[in-house]
Amino acid sequence: MKPDDLFRIRHMIEAGESALRFITGRQRADLDGDEMLRFALVRAVEIVGEAASRISPDTRAGAPTVPWSAIVAMRNRLIHAYFDIDHDILWKTVTEEIPDLLPLLRSLLPTD
């Protein structure tokens, strides 16, 4: 794997882990009333998507179980439609999709 891809995968993992920390002890309703939580989750998901968008085609091809296109599409939606973010989708992404994504990403890291 290219060093840049490894670096970006680590960024994806770190941002995903941050998102999960941000929601610890929180409920979906908190997202509506807590602007800081919304901004934090949006930013974490944006970082995951931005890093994914820069992963090389070779690395993507070698990890077909990672939903690269869907990750990048979510990032694009957050960036380009920032005024119309669906909080239910954001919450589902963080609570359901990121926990499934993290083990896939971790499996791409070299074992030392």
Image (cartoon, helix red, strand yellow):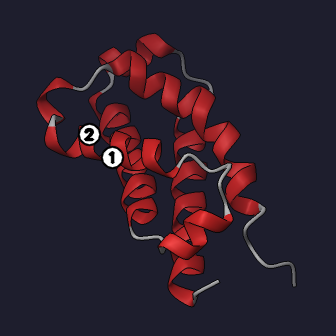
Quadrant in the picture for residue 3: bottom right
Q: Amino acid at mark 2?
A: Leu
Q: How many marks?
A: 2
Residue 59 shown left or right of residue 99 in the figure: left
Quadrant in the picture for residue 97: top right
The circle drawn on residue 75 is 1
Residue at the spot 53% in from the left edge and 16% down from the top edge: 27
- Dot 1 and dot 2 residues touching (CB under 8 Å): yes
User: Residue 88: image x %, image y %?
Assistant: 40, 16
Distance between mark 1 and mark 2 Cα atoms: 5 Å
SS label for mark 2: helix
Residue at the spot 62% in from the left edge and 25% down from the top edge: 25
Residue at the spot 54% in from the left edge and 78% down from the top edge: 5
Local packing at callout 2 (Cα closer than 10 Å; few below 14, some 14-19, many 20+) is many
User: Residue 96: image x %, image y %?
Assistant: 62, 27
Rendered view: 4 above or below 91: below
Residue 49 shown left or right of residue 84 in the figure: right
Q: Nearer the viewer, residue 28 or 104?
A: 104
The circle drawn on residue 110 is none
Which residue is labeled 2 in the image? 78
Residue 105 shown left or right of residue 37 in the figure: right
